[in-house]
């Protein structure tokens, strides 16, 4: 079973994003993949991510956004994340995966959804001070499911 800790690396986590445009934030976060050997075609991955951005608003006004692409532009499932300073969103996750890895994608998406159902999960990630801290907190939250 693939876990978030298996596919999300600290170097692919941006803390303190100031961008208020979701598409621009996705571009900035996806830029962390430019030299990743798991990405075969960054331009195509970026284009496909821009066409699949979904944000879910919570009652307290916070938003969790996801950009995802099922594509042959990646050799295996990859993940990146961004923690925003303000609105309209607070956390963005990017997932790229080959078409053959759909079951792993669904499991990761289910874990993220369960983490963000509680205020505790979102708060823990918003309070992370470094990419390594963010990753550690996210992995702990996933293990607690």
Image: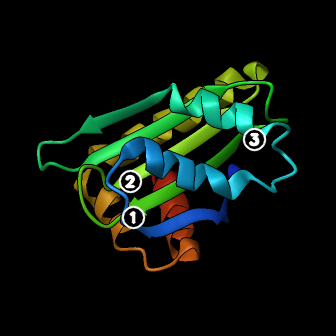
Q: Are discs 2 and 3 less than 8 Å apart at CB? A: no
Q: Residue at x 45, y 38 (%)?
A: 66
The residue depicted at 55 percent of the width and 69 percent of the height is: 136
Relative image position of residue 40 (x, y in whole percent): 86, 38
Relative side of 133 to 17, left or right: right
Q: Quick check: 74 above or below 138?
A: above
Q: Quadrant of the N terminus?
A: top right
Seen at 39% across and 38% down, the residue is 113
Q: Secondary structure at mark 1?
A: helix
Q: Taking 52 as reference, is 55 above or below it?
A: below
Relative vertical location of residue 123 with respect to residue 24 in this rendering, above or below = below
N-terminal label among 3 and 1:
3
Disc 3 + disc 1, Cβ < 8 Å: no
Res 80 visible: no
Where, by quadrant of the figure, is residue 18 drawn?
bottom left
- From the top left corner, tell me how far across and down residue 115 is, in percent: 39, 48
Residue 80 x, y percent position in the rendering: 60, 52
Reading the image, the residue beneath label 3 is: 42
State how far apart marks 1 and 2 are (Cα).
8 Å
> How far across and down, in percent of the image, does residue 5 sit?
65, 56
Badges 1 and 2: C-beta atoms under 8 Å apart?
yes
Q: Could you give the CA–CA distance between mark 3 and mark 1, rounded to whole angstroms?
A: 27 Å
Residue 92 visible to an observer of this rendering:
yes
Mark sitting on residue 76: none
Give the label on residue 91, or none.
Answer: 2
Between tags 1 and 2, which lies in front?
2
14 or 19, which is in the foreground?
A: 19
């Amino acid at each position: 079973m693939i876990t978030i800790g298996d596919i999300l690396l600290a170097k692919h986590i941006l803390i303190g994003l100031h961008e208020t445009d979701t598409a621009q934030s996705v571009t900035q976060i996806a830029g962390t993949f430019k030299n990743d050997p798991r990405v075969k075609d960054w331009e195509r991955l970026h284009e496909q991510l821009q066409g699949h951005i979904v944000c879910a608003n919570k009652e307290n006004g916070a938003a969790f956004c996801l950009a995802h692409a099922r594509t042959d532009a990646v050799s295996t499932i990859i993940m990146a994340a961004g923690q925003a300073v303000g609105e309209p969103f607070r956390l963005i996750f990017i997932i790229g995966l080959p078409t053959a890895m759909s079951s792993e994608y669904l499991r990761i998406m289910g874990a993220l959804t369960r983490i963000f159902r509680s205020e505790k999960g979102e708060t823990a990630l918003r309070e992370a001070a470094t990419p390594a801290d963010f990753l550690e907190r996210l992995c702990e939250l996933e293990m607690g499911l």
